[in-house]
Image (tube, rainbow, N blue to C red):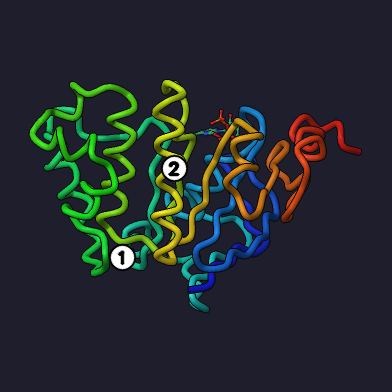
Amino acid sequence: MSFVVNDLSAGYGQLTALRNISFSIEPGEILAVIGANGAGKSTLLKTIAGQLTALTGSVVIDGEDVTKESANARARRGILMVPEGRRLFPSLTVKENLQLGTATGREGEWNLDTVCELFPLVAERLNRRAGQMSGGEQQATAIARALVGNPEVLMLDEISLGLAPAIVVELYDRLGEITKRGTTVILVEQDVKRAVSVADQVHCLLEGQTSLSGRNLDVAEIAAAYFGTGH
Ligand SMILES: Nc1ncnc2c1ncn2[C@@H]1O[C@H](COP(=O)(O)OP(=O)(O)OP(=O)(O)O)[C@@H](O)[C@H]1O
């Protein structure tokens, strides 16, 4: 499955928050999107997911242009996002939250049993209300909820935000299990070192535009692009 973003722009009313972003990802690769607060990272993910309308450009999965499709239609194609802040239903149990993730109707390796194997801390808490769990447990549940929808492209928006370092390491450790099944991962991460350590490609945004992108970039170069001191 190929995934291409070409010349994508988006915004809010008068504000163009994202300008002319292009990249392509191979199956099973991880692309890290990095940039300072307000750089446009979440806007990029929301536009790919279809929650925001693209002003220019296209999102193409497996040769099919989905730019005009609704967010639900894209989810049925396997373009799924774990949003910043997780957005679980706090009064529902973990299991009920996971069951909502199957609404994509997609067949595949991921189901309640396999996500529980991947995240034992989710397995132990299936009957707990989501709102009663720790941030790390909620984040694992949010990722598991997206996985049961059997994504082709899994987008993760700042999964480490506000979590204890140990749980962040545990969550990142699981990414290999996800990509080895061919799922492509796009992750937004503020921690440049962590992003570089897991990603095959890095895409750096500065004020809505690409300041640097590619493979095998070094951390100093990325840091310069992140802060806009690279040129
Ligand atoms: N719902 C919205 N309405 C209006 N402007 C918005 C909205 N969401 C984001 N913006 C603006 O769009 C720009 C990009 O924001 P975005 O959330 O994509 O950045 P980000 O890189 O994800 O930052 P953060 O790390 O703070 O989440 C910012 O100037 C922001 O203020």
On whether ligand 1 comes within 8 Å of the CB at mark 1, the answer is: no
Position of residue 97 in the picture relative to residue 3 (left or right):
left
Q: Residue at x 8, y 34 (%)?
A: 127
Percent position of residue 104, x then y: 25, 61
Q: Residue at x 68, y 41 (%)?
A: 208
For disc 1, the marked residue is 76
Position of residue 61 relative to residue 229, above or below, is below
Q: Residues within 10 Å of mark 1 (few under 14, many from 20)?
A: some
Position of residue 9 relative to residue 40, above or below, is below
First in residue order: circle 1 vs circle 2: 1
The residue sitting at the bottom extreme is 63
- Name the amino acid type tagged 2: Asp
Res. 140 image quadrant: top left
Percent position of residue 231, x then y: 91, 38
| Helix, strand or loop under label 2 | helix
| Helix, strand or loop under label 1 | helix
Q: Residue at x 56, y 36 (%)?
A: 189
Residue sitting nearer the eye, 12 or 81: 81
Q: Are marks 1 and 2 in contact (CB under 8 Å)?
A: no
On whether ligand 1 comes within 8 Å of the CB at mark 2, the answer is: no
Residue sitting nearer the eye, 84 or 67: 84
Residue 32, which numbered label?
Answer: none
Percent position of residue 41, x then y: 58, 40
- Name the amino acid type tagged 1: Arg
For disc 2, the marked residue is 173
Percent position of residue 64, x then y: 49, 77
Q: Quadrant of ligand 1?
A: top right
Between the C-alphas of marks 1 and 2, the distance is 27 Å
Position of residue 151 relative to residue 230, above or below, is below
Position of residue 105 in the picture relative to residue 178 (left or right):
left
